[in-house]
Image (spheres, rainbow, N blue to C red):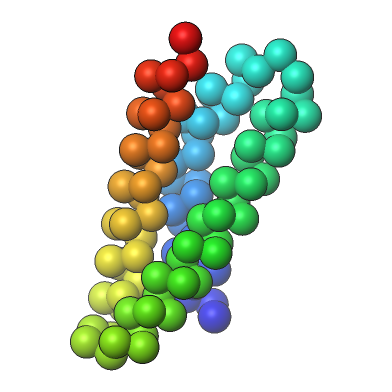
Amino acid sequence: MKAQITVGLLAYFASVWILYEQAKSYPILLDAIILIIVLLVVMLVLSYVIIAILEWVNIFELKTNAILTLVVLVAFMINLTIFLLCNSG
């Protein structure tokens, strides 16, 4: 459980600063806060699910699963950020 939370928070804080800058341009502050909170929840849920699946398959040890999950989550956040930046205009 600690690994899922740690990986989720690492992925979130590693990539949320761009979304934070994007959210500051929202006309309503509540929308920006909701976006940031929803992304935190999504990252925590995704990290829990991905690590649980990797543990269930039982190919790698927990450290390798955590690194793989971190890479997947950061790639997800980068793609989401690019999508939001391209469609913000």
| Residue 9 visible in this rendered orientation of the protein | no
Where 9 sits versus 64, above or below? above
Residue projecting furthest to the left: 59
Q: Position of residue 6 (x, y in %)?
A: 50, 67
Is 72 in front, or is 17? 72
Instruction: Name the residue: 50% across, 71% down.
Output: 48
* Total numbered labels: 0
Residue 80 versus residue 37 in the image, above or below: above
Rendered location of residue 4, percent (x, y): 49, 72
Q: Is residue 76 above or below residue 68?
A: above
Along the viewing direction, whichever of 51 and 66 lies nearer the viewer: 51
Residue 29 in sight here: yes
Horizontal and vertical percent position of residue 68: 28, 66
* Screen quadrant of the N terminus: bottom right
- Residue positioned 38% across, 19% down in the render: 86
Q: In the image shown, does 53 or 67 lie closer to the viewer?
A: 53
Residue at the outermost top position: 89
**In screen coordinates, is 20 left or right of 78?**
right
Image coordinates for residue 75, horizontal then vertical, percent: 31, 47
